[in-house]
Amino acid sequence: MSDLTLPDVAQQLFRDIQKTYQETSKISDELLIALKFVFGPCALQALDLLDQRSVTCLSSPSGRKAFQVMGGSGRLYTCFVSCHYCPCPAFAHTVLLRNEDLLCKHILAAYLCQATGMSQQESVSDQQMSVLLSGTAAP
């Protein structure tokens, strides 16, 4: 996670979730309340995506990573945590245009999967990852 784009409080929250989850295999009530406080309504939606196992971490031999998140509408969104980006309409509207939220539910679910290790894992070739990064097709 880059120090330049997410507030320190959000980064610390993800670290705390990771540590607690490694020790207890749970996210404590205190951390759930903190998630809701920092990220608002999308926190619960992101946790639902985790519970539904809607997040897949794609990785290539060169070390690139992307997350694919199946949204509630059935649409698959490819999220990039390295640059805090999701192509969904909510990200464009509430994060980029109106600056109301830090993240959308899809990218938050990807961060939570990184912290908990709860995502499905899929390996793709470097060529597939390049196509994915270019936005021209899915792997």
Image: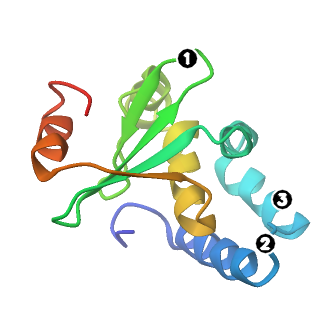
Task: Give the Cα distance between marks 3 and 2.
Answer: 17 Å
Residue farthest to the right, as pictured: 29
Residue 122 visible: yes
Q: Are marks 1 and 2 in contact (CB under 8 Å)?
A: no
Question: Could you tell me which secondary element the residue under label 1 belongs to?
Answer: loop
- At a point 44% along the width and 32% down the height, the residue shown is 91
- At a point 31% along the width and 59% down the height, the residue shown is 82
Q: Which mark sits nearer the N-terminus, 1 or 2?
A: 2
- The percent position of residue 47, horizontal first and vertical second, equals 72, 46
Q: With respect to residue 96, does 72 lie above or below?
A: above
Residue 32: quarter of image? bottom right
> Could you tell me the amino acid type at mark 3?
Ile
Q: With respect to residue 1, does 15 lie above or below?
A: below
Question: Could you tell me which secondary element the residue under label 2 belongs to?
Answer: loop
Badge 1 density bin: few <14, some 14–19, many ≥20, Cα 10 Å: few
> Could you tell me the amino acid type at mark 2?
Ser
Question: Could you tell me which secondary element the residue under label 3 belongs to?
Answer: helix
Q: Which residue is mark 2?
A: 25
Q: Which mark sits nearer the N-terminus, 3 or 2?
A: 2
Q: Which label sits in the foreground, 3 or 2?
A: 2
Q: Which label sits in the foreground, 1 or 3?
A: 1
Q: Which residue is mark 3?
A: 33
- At a point 19% along the width and 63% down the height, the residue shown is 61
76 sits to left or right of 59: right
5 sits to left or right of 70: left
- The percent position of residue 12, horizontal first and vertical second, equals 59, 76
Task: Give the Cα distance between marks 1 and 2.
Answer: 28 Å
Q: Nearer the viewer, residue 138 or 123?
A: 123
Q: Which residue is mark 1?
A: 74
45 sits to left or right of 82: right
